[in-house]
Image (tube, rainbow, N blue to C red):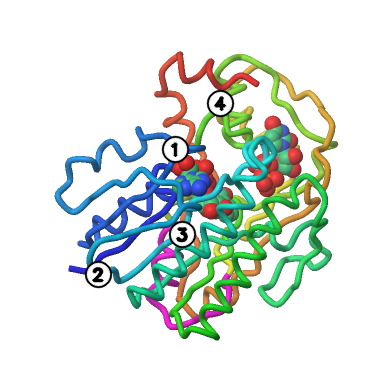
Amino acid sequence: MKKVLITGAAGFLGSHLCDRFIKEGYKVIGMDNFITGDSKNVKHLMNHSNFEFIEHDVTNFISIDGELDYILHFASPASPIDYLKIPIQTLKVGSLGTHNLLGVAKEKNARMLIASTSEIYGDPLVHPQTEDYYGNVNTIGPRGVYDEAKRFQESITMAYHRFHGVETRIVRIFNTYGPRMRLNDGRVIPAFMGQALRGEDLTIFGDGSQTRSFCYIDDQVEGIYRLLLSDYVYPVNIGNPHEISISDFAEEIIKLTNTTQKVIYKDLPVNDPMQRQPDISLARKLLGWEPKVQREEGMKITFEYFKNLTKEDLHKSEH
Ligand code: NAD
Ligand code: UDP
């Protein structure tokens, strides 16, 4: 039985990856320190005979017993309000955490996949973003802590591959959504859905002309799974190329949720990228992958999830 270590297991993406690998018949070790995650996301796995959970901060030395085939490093704050609140931890998990995990991969002869991000392209001057674009990141801006941690993560991963021969994979994830996102994580989908559910106006940052392209979680997990098992070591974009402006998106959410609220405008956060759309030609060619879930369908499923949260969860999320 193959064994995989998944960091960030109690988070949104990490918990869905745990589910997928369990379903594929792997032995899964989930690791998390709960800094932005929630034990509820893996509660259903806790008694599974092929699942083991280790509460641990990956920026500290990591010790794993026995053999290991794969490592998926997904631990990191991922939403702007999280990484602005805990900037040093964000830099450390991308740098020290990645270094520790690459050390484990080298010792165990395991293949390691890292979760990189479309944020490494910064506020992009090339559109849509192809993997060969170097990006436009403000190193000293507030978002720099996340973007530069992820850029360093890619560099050290390639260095371990080139210098130590570690088998590595790099996925550049574009905005992904679905059940188990934290309602109060500040990202636009939980923000708008939470506001609609609480009967508040939807907050658009800036004039709403900035764009994003939203990928449903199941599509994202499928892309990551295929990339891990492929033999391609360079970065691959995984995301949904269907782009929409934030103001049009707010209208879609108003329709979907049937809210009578309106939109209100707030300041655009510093260095908020004006446009974002993945070019997924490489993923199509290499992995035979493309997203299958339309935004309308994915948003419905996600809204159902938020609707079923407790009142306490809903009101915890006001910010
Ligand atoms: P999340 O906040 O839901 O999950 C991250 C998990 O990592 C949390 O459970 C958190 O407690 C854990 N964690 C953070 N620091 C840790 C540490 N030092 N030690 C152990 N655990 C730690 O975020 P997510 O959306 O699931 O993102 C997961 C990964 O995917 C991140 O690396 C993120 O950068 C990347 N990513 C996500 C998106 C997206 O749209 N969701 C886009 C691009 C990249
Ligand atoms: N956004 C918004 N209102 C909100 C939350 C976010 O208009 O309540 C905007 C945000 O400024 C950004 C876009 O929505 O332009 C996506 O933000 P998110 O935090 O989801 O992801 P990221 O900026 O990391 O892509």
* N-term mark: 1 or 2: 1
Nearest the camera: 250 or 96? 96
* N-term mark: 4 or 3: 3
The residue singled out by tag 1 in the image is 34
Which residues, given as a range, are shown in magenta? 219-236
* N-term mark: 4 or 2: 2
Viewer-side label of 4, 1: 1
The image quadrant of residue 123 is bottom right
What is the CA distance from the residue labelled 4 to the residue labelled 2? 48 Å
Residues under numbered marks 4 and 1 in contact, where contact means CB atoms less than 8 Å apart: no
What is the CA distance from the residue labelled 2 to the residue labelled 3? 17 Å
Near mark 1 (Cα within 10 A), the count class, few <14, some 14-19 or many ≥20, is: some
Which numbered tag is attached to residue 73?
Answer: 3
Look at 46% across and 28% down and name the residue there.
306
Q: Is residue 178 above or below residue 241?
A: above
The residue singled out by tag 4 in the image is 257
- The residue type indicated by label 4 comes to Thr
Which numbered tag is attached to residue 67?
Answer: 2
Look at 75% across and 72% down and name the residue there.
134
Q: Quadrant of the C terminus?
A: top right
- The residue type indicated by label 1 comes to Phe
